[in-house]
């Protein structure tokens, strides 16, 4: 075992560790590299640099995205995966081959066979397992898989192409959805939505074809177009795995299914909707690995975070998250729930729908079509001896009154409202019929938020803010509470030039300049002064005045701070805070 001996000679491991490693290799039959890395004795780069010296083979580092995809045809995927070797570069008939285990004689023999078969000469380089895995993923690139699946689909459709405008029978759809091309196309779409970190998949029938779009970082992008004839079968396939009625195309339907990908259980929330040219399908991708469970990852920090943590310690009262659809309200409430989720707490949620399952929490999905509404469910929840209740949304008078009653009788209640900002929360509750004198003892805090795209950390660069942008930033900073304003001006030296960030666009961020999203927040606390405003005359102007007095940072101001920090761009902040 050459690496173990080399590590021993360099006194990086002792005799006992070397013996233990050798015994594990003998017992498991695994490679020494795998076991050394698994135990964390040294890192991958050092280990393979050492291996390169010992074997006298150059270590090659290459980014998978920099390789042309057609070069991968030289070594079939099955052979690449089995022997852990991949083509790296080709010039005329000379090919550079990357191997994780060039000392493997069987791999060398397989490579000689492929070279003779395809008539190329080669030079072997050493690559790390990480480089190999990155290149192996290119074998399953979206375009390659889509092309293959489309070719199969076209062949299948040509076999029995229906006459123009002829309706497709349920029997024909049922027969097609069990065939490989349709199943493969749906699998390709799902797989690459997950790998591309899409939050939603839209499958839309147009007049001449079907369009598939992925929502990435809040923005919809067209990914591919499919033959119009395939649309009913693709929709039916999704309905089957979602346990929906395939013969019902006149009304919307909702469903859910799960798949396991790379040992991760991923849920898809499905909604169908009848349109002029057929049924549109939208699937929300609920990947537990993308779910955030820490406040800092959401974008909460400083005074806003301290107010939330203080409110969480209260034995009763309401915590309300507000904002438009898709701004991350439920995610914020989930993070709060996870921090409140202790052994001695009985937590019950009413959701529409349940997005993520949280261990130790009793989650229930409302079903309005059978009379199981938020209001009806809340009545029953109160009989379940809860300590903490989450109501997905307060959308009517009955739910508002029941949630208020629950908060007044010793429960922590979390819920969402649709208002533009925290200032609108109190007027909205009054509009819903909550009596004014019940609001001060009920509300603990209101959180308003939006999601902005993060600037790509790999290609971001500093630029000088000038003209109107510079004046806008100065104006917002001047309105920030004095202690924070002083700290910010000193930290970023705002008395001189103001620098902001922008993404140039790179392979990692698909040339968009953005990667991921982060929240911008404002948090309003129920103080004694605000209680007086509510009881006297709760106009938005007076509530806003009290918010400024208590030092609340607005969403736009929070966004500006994140711009200066290099987390997002000024364009993003202005886009999502247009109403300010």
Image (cartoon, rainbow, N blue to C red):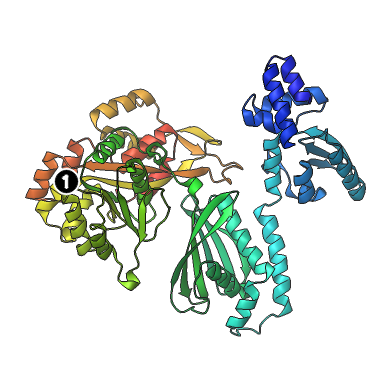
Q: Nearer the viewer, residue 158 or 77?
A: 77
Residue drawn at the location 24% of the way across and 32% of the way down: 481
Q: Position of residue 500 (x, y in %)?
A: 43, 34
**Residue 91 in which image quadrant:** top right
Q: Please, is residue 580 above or below residue 494 in the view?
A: below
Can residue 564 be spotted in the picture?
yes
Where the N terminus falls, by quadrant?
Answer: top right
Q: Please tell me whether mark 1 sits on a helix, a strand or a loop.
A: helix
Q: Is residue 210 left or right of residue 343?
A: right
Q: Is residue 539 left or right of residue 258?
A: left
Q: Position of residue 410 (x, y in %)?
A: 18, 48
Residue drawn at the location 79% of the way across and 28% of the way down: 58
Kindly identify which residue carries mark 1.
543
Q: Position of residue 338 (x, y in %)?
A: 37, 43
**Residue 402 in which image quadrant:** bottom left
Q: Please, is residue 397 above or below residue 436 in the view?
A: below
């Amino acid at each position: 075992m050459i690496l173990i001996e080399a590590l021993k000679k360099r006194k990086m491991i002792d005799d006992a560790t070397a013996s233990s490693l050798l015994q594990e290799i003998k017992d498991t039959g695994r490679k020494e590299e795998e076991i050394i890395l698994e135990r964390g004795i040294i890192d991958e780069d050092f280990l393979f640099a050492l291996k390169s010296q010992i074997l006298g083979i150059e270590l090659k580092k290459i980014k998978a995205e920099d390789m042309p995809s057609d070069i991968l045809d030289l070594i079939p995927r099955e052979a690449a995966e089995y022997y852990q070797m991949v083509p790296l570069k080709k010039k005329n008939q000379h090919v550079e081959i990357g191997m994780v285990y060039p000392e493997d004689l069987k791999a060398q023999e397989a490579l000689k066979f492929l070279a003779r078969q395809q008539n190329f000469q080669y030079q072997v380089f050493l690559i790390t397992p990480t480089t190999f895995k990155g290149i192996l993923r290119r074998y399953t690139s979206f375009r390659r898989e889509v092309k293959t699946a489309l070719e199969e689909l076209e062949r299948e459709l040509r076999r029995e192409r229906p006459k123009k405008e002829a309706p497709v029978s349920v029997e024909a759809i049922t027969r097609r959805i069990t065939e490989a091309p349709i199943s493969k196309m749906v699998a390709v779409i799902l797989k690459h939505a997950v790998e591309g970190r899409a939050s939603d998949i839209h499958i839309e029938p147009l007049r001449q074809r079907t369009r598939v779009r992925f929502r990435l970082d809040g923005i919809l992008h067209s990914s591919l177009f499919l033959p119009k004839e395939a649309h009913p079968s693709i929709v039916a396939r999704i309905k089957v795995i979602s346990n929906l009625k395939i013969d019902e195309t006149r009304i919307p339907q909702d469903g859910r299914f799960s798949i396991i990908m790379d040992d991760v259980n991923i849920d898809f929330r499905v909604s169908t909707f009848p349109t002029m040219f057929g049924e549109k399908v939208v699937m929300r991708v609920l990947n537990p690995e993308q779910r955030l469970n820490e406040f800092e990852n959401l974008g909460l920090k400083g005074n806003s975070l301290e107010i939330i943590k203080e409110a969480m310690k209260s034995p009763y009262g309401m915590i309300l998250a507000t904002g438009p659809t898709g701004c991350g309200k439920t995610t914020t409430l989930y993070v709060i729930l996870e921090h409140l989720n202790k052994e001695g707490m009985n937590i019950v949620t009413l959701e529409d729908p349940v997005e993520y399952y949280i261990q130790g929490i009793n989650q229930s999905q409302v079903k309005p079509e059978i009379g199981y509404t938020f209001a009806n469910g809340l009545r029953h929840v109160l009989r379940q001896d809860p300590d903490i209740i989450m109501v997905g949304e307060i959308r009517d008078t009955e739910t508002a009154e029941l949630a208020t009653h629950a908060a007044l009788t010793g429960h922590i209640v979390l819920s969402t409202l649709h208002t533009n900002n925290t200032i609108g929360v109190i007027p909205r509750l009054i509009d819903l019929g909550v009596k004014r004198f019940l609001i001060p003892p009920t509300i603990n805090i209101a959180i308003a938020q939006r999601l902005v795209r993060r600037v790509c950390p790999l290609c971001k660069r500093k630029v000088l803010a000038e003209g109107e942008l510079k004046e806008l930033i100065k104006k917002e900073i001047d309105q920030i509470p004095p202690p924070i304003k002083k700290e910010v001006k000193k930290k970023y030296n705002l008395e001189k030039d103001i620098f902001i960030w922008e993404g140039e666009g790179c392979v990692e961020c698909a040339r968009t300049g953005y990667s991921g999203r982060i929240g911008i927040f404002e948090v309003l606390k129920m103080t004694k002064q605000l209680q007086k405003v509510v009881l006297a005359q709760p106009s938005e102007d007076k509530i806003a005045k009290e918010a400024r007095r208590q030092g609340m940072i607005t969403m736009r101001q929070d966004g500006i701070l994140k711009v200066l920090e290099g987390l997002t761009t000024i364009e993003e902040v202005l886009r999502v805070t247009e109403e300010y």
